Amino acid sequence: MGISCNYSPLHNPTIRLAAAIKQALGSEIIVAVGGNHATATHEYLLRSSQGSVNYLCKGEGETSLVELVEGISAGAQLESIRGISFFTRGRDPTRKRLRTGPGRSQYASPPCLHLAPMAKYKRYNIISSRGCPYVCTYCASKVIATRLRYRSPVNVVDEIEHLLTTYGQKHFWFSDDTFTANIKHSMDLMDEIIRRNLSITWSCLTRVNVTSRDLLRRMKSSGCTYVSYASSRETARS
C-alpha cells in the first residue's frame, strides 16, 4: 500500500493510516510512504511509525517505488535501490539499522490512468515541468526535485486531449511548482491549447514576479480561471 505524506500536518495521520491498514488487512501488508514531508524527515517518520511504515520513497519516487515492488517480489537485496529508506534488524533483534539508498532525480512517463477510478476525480492533475528555479526557505520543492525540467508543449497538450477524449470534460490543475517560471514555455503551451481550439478550464500556481498583463491575457484566452500566487521575495538561482 502506498501513502503520500506531502505536508507536515499529515505526519501523524499518515502513521495512523498505516497502522489502520495493517490492523485491517494484516501485519504482513507492506506499507510505503513518499512525498515532501516524508522525504525531508525520512528517518524520523520511519522511527515514529513504530513499524507501521515499512519503506519510504525519497524525492521523485515513481521509479524507486517500481524497483521496490519488483525487489520485494523477487526477494532481492533492497539496499542498492536508489531513493529508498528502511530499517533492518541485525543479530540483535532489539536494534534496528537504517538503510537508505542514494537519492535520485526522476521523470516518469504519464501515469497508467486506465488503472485508476477516474470517474471519482473532479479534476485532472497535470504537470508541464518539475522543479523550480527559486529557493524559498519555506518551500519543499528542492527536497523533491533538484533539477528544473520541462515537457514539450505539444506533449502536454497531447495528454490534455487524451484526458478529454477518454474521460470527459473536467477542470485541469497544473501541479507545476511555478507554472510561469519560463514564460516562453508557458506561452508556447497556451498557444498550443488555443491552436487546437480546446475548450477547457484550468488553474495553476505561480509567482507575481513572473507574470505580466500579456501573459495573464493569454492565460485567460486559453481557459485559465484562477491562479494561486506564492511569495516573490526570494531570488532565483542562476
Image: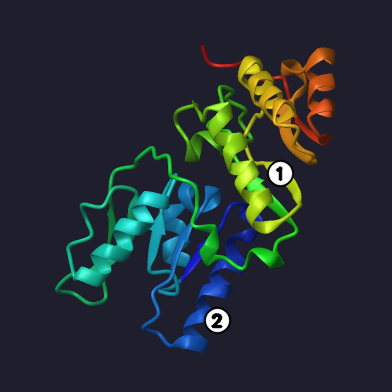
Q: Say which residue label 1 marks.
A: 173
Residue 163 position, x and y percent, is 64, 50
Above/below status of 156 relative to 84: above
The three-letter amino acid code for the residue at tag 1 is: Trp
Taking 204 as reference, is 3 above or below it?
Answer: below
| 143 or 110: nearer the viewer | 110
| Earlier residue among tags 2 and 1 | 2
Relative to 169, is 21 on the left or the right? Answer: left
Residue drawn at the location 51% of the way across and 78% of the way down: 19
**To which quarter of the image does residue 79 belong?**
bottom left
Give the left or right position of residue 43, taking residue 185 as reference: left
Q: Are marks 2 and 1 in contact (CB under 8 Å)?
A: no
Q: Residues within 10 Å of mark 1 (few under 14, many from 20)?
A: some
Task: Examine the image and state in which quarter residue 182 appears.
Answer: top right
Mark closer to the observer (2, 1): 1
Query: What x and y, as percent, mark residue 135?
Result: 57, 25
Give the camera-side residue of 62 and 96. Answer: 62
Q: Residue at x 36, y 50 (%)?
A: 63
- Residue depicted at x 66% and y 17%: 183
Image coordinates for residue 37, horizontal then vertical, percent: 54, 51
Q: Could you tell me the amino acid type at mark 2?
A: Ala
Image coords of residue 201 (percent x, y) = 80, 41
Classed neighbour count for the residue bearing mark 2: other residues with Cα under 10 Å, few (<14), some (14–19), many (≥20): few
Question: Quick one: which residue is furthest to the left in this view?
Answer: 91
Is 9 displayed left or right of 68 in the figure? Answer: right
Q: How many marks?
A: 2
Q: What residue appears at the point 56 percent right and 22 percent down from the top-left corner?
A: 133
**Residue annotated with mark 2:** 20
